[in-house]
Image (cartoon, rainbow, N blue to C red):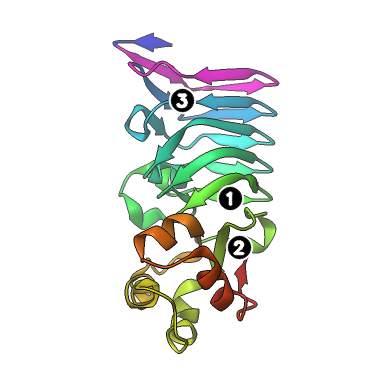
């Protein structure tokens, strides 16, 4: 449905289709009452042009052709068995009903999803078990259970300002954060250190995946 610049997918089930969400002048609204199974979604729009209202994605592939920044709306979606490709930064996935008091944030979830072909930076898993997920390898790295592990991470010496800024503020993450994935080159640049220096410390912890 196309209405006043809004392209709406709602109240239906779509299977085995390729959806190209690439019109930068359109607002794409997915849901409510939308189920996509075994579909490929090509995303090439900024976060403000993509709204998720309780859609269910099952065995879908997301091809992110333009870096998707600060898209918390994923927590309004149910994701099962999906694959992500491309660059995502500041995005949240899973169950986080406190994020916004709207009905479609009550049933967000993520399980059995694969981020191994994605580049994640500052992306979080909320209120869901990260053990069912595949995270990207180095130069991305994923801190599991970041709030509970924060004291342990603060006890070691980190290079540059990574410890003073990123590690020191882990306890301020939302209480539902179960995993945090960062991109080492971006962290090295931001905190005046190197990827190798970061990795040397990361390797000490079995709850950091890399």
Q: Secondary structure at mark 1?
A: strand
Q: Front-most of 39 and 205?
A: 205
In front: mark 3 or mark 1?
3
Question: To which residue does mark 2 refer?
Answer: 129
Crowdedness of circle 1 by 10 Å Cα count: few (<14), some, many (20+)? many
Crowdedness of circle 2 by 10 Å Cα count: few (<14), some, many (20+)? some
Residue 131 coordinates in the image, percent (x, y): 67, 63
Q: Tell me if 181 is positioned left or right of 165 in this view.
A: right
Residue at point 65% right, 40% down?
Answer: 83
Q: Is residue 80 above or below residue 21?
A: below
For marks 2 and 1 on the same chain, the one whose residue lies earlier in the sequence: 1
Question: To which residue does mark 3 refer?
Answer: 44
Residue 30 coordinates in the image, percent (x, y): 46, 27
Residue 10 coordinates in the image, percent (x, y): 48, 22
Can you tell which quarter of the image residue 130 is in?
bottom right
- Tell me the CA gap for discs 2 and 1: 8 Å
State the extent of the magenta-drawn residues as a range.
5-25
In the picture, the disc for residue 110 is 1
């Amino acid at each position: 449905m196309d209405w006043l610049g809004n392209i709406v997918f709602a109240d239906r089930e779509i299977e085995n289709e390729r959806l190209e969400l690439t019109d930068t002048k359109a607002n794409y609204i997915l849901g409510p009452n939308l189920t996509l199974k075994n579909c490929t979604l090509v995303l090439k729009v900024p976060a403000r042009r993509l709204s998720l209202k309780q859609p269910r994605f099952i065995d879908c592939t997301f091809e992110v052709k333009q870096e998707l920044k600060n898209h918390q709306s994923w927590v309004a979606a149910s994701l099962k068995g999906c694959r992500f490709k491309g660059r995502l930064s500041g995005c949240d996935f899973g169950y986080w009903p406190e994020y916004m008091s709207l009905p479609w944030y009550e049933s967000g979830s993520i399980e059995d999803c694969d981020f191994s072909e994605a580049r994640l930076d500052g992306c979080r898993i909320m209120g869901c078990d990260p053990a069912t997920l595949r995270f990207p390898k180095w130069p991305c790295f994923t801190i599991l259970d970041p709030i509970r592990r924060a004291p342990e991470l603060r006890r070691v010496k980190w290079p540059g300002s990574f410890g003073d800024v990123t590690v020191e503020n882990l306890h301020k993450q939302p209480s539902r954060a179960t995993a945090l994935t960062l991109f080492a080159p971006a962290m090295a640049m931001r905190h005046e250190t190197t990827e190798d220096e970061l990795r040397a410390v990361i390797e000490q912890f079995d709850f950091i995946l890399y």
